[in-house]
């Protein structure tokens, strides 16, 4: 048995298939951890989502910002859904869209295996959050996403404010938690997220730190694997393994074996990107 974490797929079905072949994935014995952002921009979001859904008994995928955006758009009127890009429209108007979206909505914001010694999030953790606190805060939002009031949450989750604070309540608390788990790259020591800062470390404004290197951050008892930050690329340090290596931008798709005593990383080329490409976000 092998357990593999895989970086952001973002609708790159071909590279996903090639990576599963490279790691010799056997659904009868192996397990996959997907770091979120299964969909958007890769041109094959429907096929990718169907593939992960078909493996649902053998995998877990944390929710990324693009996954949550898809869920929110899925609750809008058809005329509004037709305004999004063709890749997402392919999911929204598929005959099995409801089944796929209902399954996606049940996926967690955090996945931890304490026996294995790993935690997976899409983006990061607030500076003062221990792994136990992260699980607690994730569970607050997950309960609402899986409950009858999920539409209200999806309608109101957008926005850059407020910054996380333990005293937040209701939708502001939910929004702050979601922003940490799915949008965090840089922040201040007090946890205020710099949403516009997306470059490599060293390019950010003074007073900002990569979330995993904030002075005074909480000690964490699990290794963390995450995605989201394609400009960072493959990064290993501070107990963090960041594995979004920009497959959708023409980079690579990365798998990291979690149950190996040695560092074992497998990569395949990402999708072919037109010369002008896309603006990363």
Image: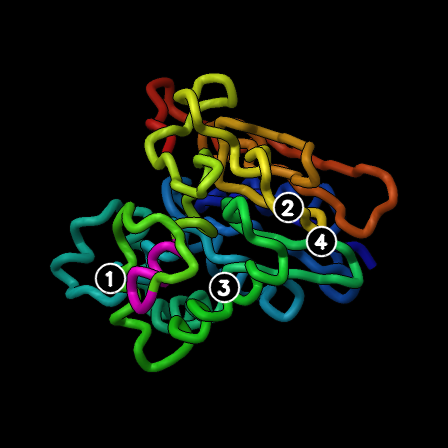
Query: In x, y percent, where is residue 269?
Result: 59, 30
Q: Secondary structure at mark 4?
A: strand
- Element type where label 3 sits in the image: helix
231 on left or right of 26: left
Q: Which residues are magenta?
A: 169-178
The mark nearer the N terminus, 3 or 4, is 4
- SS majority, magenta: helix
Question: For the point 63% across and 42% down, which residue is it?
Answer: 18
Asked whether residue 38 is in view, the answer is no
Mark 4 packing: few (<14 Cα in 10 Å), some, or many (20+)? some
Label total for image: 4
Specify which label sits upstream in the sequence, 1 or 3.
3
The crowding category of the residue bearing disc 3, from other C-alpha atoms within 10 Å (few below 14, some 14 to 19, many at least 20), is many
Q: CA distance from mark 2 to mark 1?
A: 28 Å
Task: Check contact, mark 2 vs mark 3: CB within 8 A.
Answer: no
Q: Residue furthest right?
A: 261
- Disc 2 to disc 4, how far (Cα)? 7 Å
């Amino acid at each position: 048995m092998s357990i593999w974490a895989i970086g952001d797929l973002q609708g790159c079905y071909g590279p996903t298939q090639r990576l599963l072949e490279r790691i010799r994935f056997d659904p009868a014995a192996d397990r996959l951890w997907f770091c979120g952002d299964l969909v958007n921009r890769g041109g094959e979001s429907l096929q990718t989502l169907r593939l992960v859904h078909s493996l649902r008994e053998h995998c877990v995928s944390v929710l990324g910002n693009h996954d949550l955006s898809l869920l929110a758009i899925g609750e809008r009127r058809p005329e509004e859904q037709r305004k999004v890009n063709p890749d997402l429209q392919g999911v929204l108007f598929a005959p099995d869209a409801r089944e796929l979206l209902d399954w996606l909505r049940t996926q967690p914001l955090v996945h931890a295996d304490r026996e294995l010694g790993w935690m997976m999030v899409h983006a990061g953790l607030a500076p003062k959050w221990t792994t136990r606190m992260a699980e607690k805060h994730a569970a607050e939002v997950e309960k609402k996403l899986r409950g009858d009031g999920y539409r209200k949450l999806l309608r109101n989750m957008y926005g850059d404010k407020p910054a996380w604070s333990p005293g937040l309540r209701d939708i502001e608390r939910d929004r702050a938690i979601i922003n940490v788990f799915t949008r965090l790259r840089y922040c201040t020591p007090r946890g205020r997220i710099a949403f516009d800062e997306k470059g490599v470390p060293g390019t950010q404004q003074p007073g900002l730190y990569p979330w995993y290197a904030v002075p005074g951050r909480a000690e964490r008892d699990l290794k963390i694997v995450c995605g989201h930050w394609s400009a960072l690329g493959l990064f290993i340090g501070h107990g963090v393994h960041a594995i979004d290596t920009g497959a959708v931008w023409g980079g690579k798709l990365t798998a990291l074996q979690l149950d190996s005593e040695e560092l074992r990383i497998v990569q395949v080329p990402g999708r072919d990107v037109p010369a002008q490409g896309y603006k990363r976000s």
